[in-house]
Amino acid sequence: IITAPEECEIGVQRIAPTCIQKGFDSGGPITCSTNCRWNTDSCVNYVCGNNVREGTEACDGNTEILSCTTLDGYKGTKTRACNPPAGTNACQWGSFGNCIPNEFCGDGTIQTSARETCEGSNLGGNTCRSLGYDKGTVSCNTNCTLNTAQCSNIDSDEPVLPGTGSVDIGIVFPGASWAARNPEDVGLKQSGVDQFVSAVRNFSSNGMVIKDGYQVASWGSLSDKNDWASAAKPVHSTLLFFAVKEGKLSGIGDRIASYVNKVLGKSLRSADLPMTFRHLSNMTSGYTLPEGPGEAWAYNDYAIKLYVRMLYDGVYGTSNANQVAINTNRLGALGFQDGSIFSSRDGYGLSTSVRDFARIGWLWANKGYWNGRQLFPKEYFDLYVNVQVPSNLPRTTGSSVDDYLGVGTIGGGNDLSSLGPGVYGANFWFNANKKLFPDLPADTYQAVGHWGTKVLTVFPSQRMVVVHWQSGTRDQSGYNRDFNSVARSLINAVVAQPEPTPTPTSKGKIIVDPTNPEWLIYENGKPFFMCGPGDPEDFLYRGTLLNDGTRSGDQLNLINKLKGTGANSIYLQAIRSHGGDGNNTHNPFINHDPTKGLNAKVLDQWESWFSEMDRNSIVIYFFFYDDSANIWNTGDIVGSAEKAFIEGIVNRFEHHKNLIWVVAEEYGEKFSATRVSNIAQVIRSADNNQHVIGVHKNESISFSEFANDPNIGQFAMQINSPSTPTEMHVEVLKAWNNASGRYNLNMSEAANQPIDSSARKMNWAAAMAGAYVTALGWTIDNTPKETLVDCGRLVNFMESTTLNKMSPRDDLASAGTQYLLANPGQSYIAYSASLSGDIGIKNMSAGTYSFKWLDILTGYSLTQTRVQVLSGTQNFKLPPGIGKEVAVFILKE
């Protein structure tokens, strides 16, 4: 019998606890000792620093050293140390330090052999225009690569339905035929074009050159229809993009296993079950080969046959690839002159004319835009039309063909070329780092058939497309050499255009809307919205600590990952020492000693990061204090030392426009409400630019203690309960109602916030309840780019509305509308995560409205104008191309 204080009795059956349950790291089993207590002698704790890797340790006592890549513009080595994370005994790897620019960078000469593209003020003749942008200024990075952060395009993504308005962005498209122009009319030297045509005819019988949408040169027959061999492969990938846009696939990462069973009545072998459309389009599927998906490169025509069967027969439900392609909502919108485009190779081969293939190339050059319609989101080019096969991916070890599904080949074998890693993606060939064509622009890309006899080349920077065809085949390395030589004259024929004066596009700093304090706006009066990472809190302290107090970390890499996604925040903290979650070096003071004042070199480094964020409209979500951090124990008073610290920070960084101050995280752990208000007063007095000031609070939906504080405009909320989008929406709505229009909300920390695609619905649920979003756990390096893009779509959509005049009005939602924001009678944002039926709104005022629809899953956007609406409850059907995860902005004109 076991009686207290006994824990066990020898011979009496009782389940023993584990070592972990007893507070150890590992070991066991635990047995019952003669004194009737559990014997834990076999349990152990990990020891970081004993040079033995134990349990969950990733390392112990060693340092990893990797060589930097000179070909990528760096030299030397980068290291990372093995250290225990705070509060544990288990060693883990730290972050790699930075490589340094190579020995050529800084010598005043652009060394192309070292992959330099600029040197200081020497930009190699590049301008934003020559690099494919509409306006802006190019600069040179410290590693002698071009910086295009200040370049931008005139945004014209938004298609308009026929008869409801027009889009005019100055791009020319062919009508029934290509319009011809003399080269000089479109900024080309006639002599250079003539030289190119004369030379390229040595290895092509038919071809043409398109510049700015006009035919400027041609040779041979433009109307003969011929097979284009492997140049068809990027066209198949384009039809893959349409499948994603139409919601037939959730993304190119969808697995093919279900389609194999559907189409072939067979199953993938177990090692191939992870195979996706992405693997097939990147030649990394491993089909018929010994490697699994993603493990090796193989230019594999058996895998391509599997690809097209799964895409057309499986996803589209028909073996008639041409019927799929020429749908007027797909490639049929291009108005082919010569009829069908797929007919060879069992119906999956591209068999078309030079002039019709050029139309497809011009669609690619315009990132899916065609004559007033964005046929699929241009984001797909940013995500997919780039190098996707890593340069260090090994080539398959090869074997005899194991076509166990019996699909056959589209043309060749299963291991046709070693060329591909570092230059291939989505079946396109890319001139990344000028590896294929040293003398041609780095953004050049191609569709290539028969190793260079059937080719379409896109020169995005020059707004040119070149198509050429010849029978037979050849060696690709020989073609690359020859094309580099002859196309050089065509690129040199481009007459340099003067850089236009940049048009000011800054929306100004972020401020509280003086009329509607429940929202933030830009200085120009336009709505502001924020959705982005709510981590890493230690952003400012990532990487190796250097002697001067600065860091050798990955901060710029994280910023660069955010660029272009539209996600627009980084949640970061200045003081993480003195009780915070960081160590004693996580503060910006000289020698980490608050009595010695701020370290100017540390602030300079922060400024470099903040400037890059500001240039790219990424919000510096700046916390003065981490939770529990408290250096100055002065009660409710802000003493002189703390005041000097706050003023020093504010005066150093107040010039940034995309900046929000936050007093403290989980302020109640160390500070009183009075102390927080006093800190906010110091910030407000020091800040000549009057930025928004927020406060983060431990789990709560009430902010009553600061509701009427004139200096505090944002409640950074923490909710630990929501596990579904509905729960998120309900909790944020409660906080919105508590606010009563006195301050705005940021859903800054929500437990159970996912990091995959399901995060999208959580973010929209919070937004439709009236809150901005900074997602807990998104440390950027761990966040899929697609998740960041989803956040960016939310930002872009909300900022295109009159959000700052609306409030949550789910009571006006009708039919399939799930959530509704409204300024009744004037404007509405209706949302559904999975629409059933129509979008419906109650009590509408009669009038003329515009509708901006967003397919949230794909990013496809479409606008209808001059829509007549009657009064009362009204229902609206989805327009073509818009899926069931949908939002629509409705504005009375």
Image (spheres, helix red, strand yellow):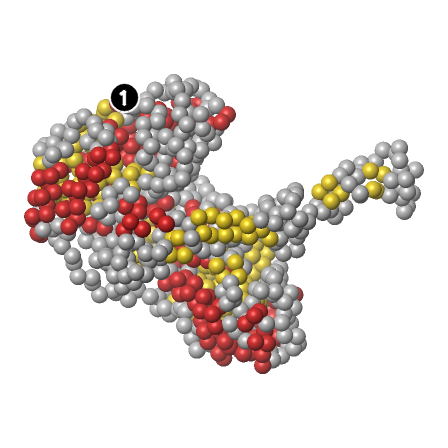
| Front one among 76 and 509 | 76
> How far across and how far down the image is residue 8, in percent?
87, 40
| Front one among 181 and 334 | 181
Quadrant placement of the C terminus: bottom left
> How far across and how far down the image is residue 738, in percent?
57, 64
Q: Does residue 170 sit above or below 599 in this rendering?
A: above
> How far across and how far down the image is residue 329, in percent?
27, 38
Quadrant placement of the N terminus: top right
Residue 517 in view here: no
Q: Does residue 463 sit above or below 247 in this rendering?
A: below
- Label 1 neighbourhood size at 10 Å, few (<14), some (14-19), many (20+)? few
> How far across and how far down the image is residue 365, in percent?
24, 45
| Front one among 47 and 7 | 47
Q: Does residue 720 sit above or below 505 in this rendering?
A: above
Q: Residue at x 35, y 56 (%)?
A: 103
| Front one among 854 and 344 | 344
Q: Quadrant of residue 579?
A: bottom right
Q: Residue at x 47, y 70 (%)?
A: 601
Name the residue furthest bottom. Answer: 640
Residue placed under numbered mark 1 in the picture = 346
Q: Quadrant of residue 702?
A: bottom right
What's the amino acid at mark 1? Answer: Asp
Is 64 positioned to the left or the right of 187 in the image? right
Q: Residue at x 15, y 42 (%)?
A: 486
The mark total stands at: 1
Q: Residue at x 84, y 42 (%)?
A: 38
Residue 570 in view here: yes
Q: Does residue 314 sit above or below 183 in this rendering?
A: above
Is 60 positioned to the left or the right of 887 in the image? right
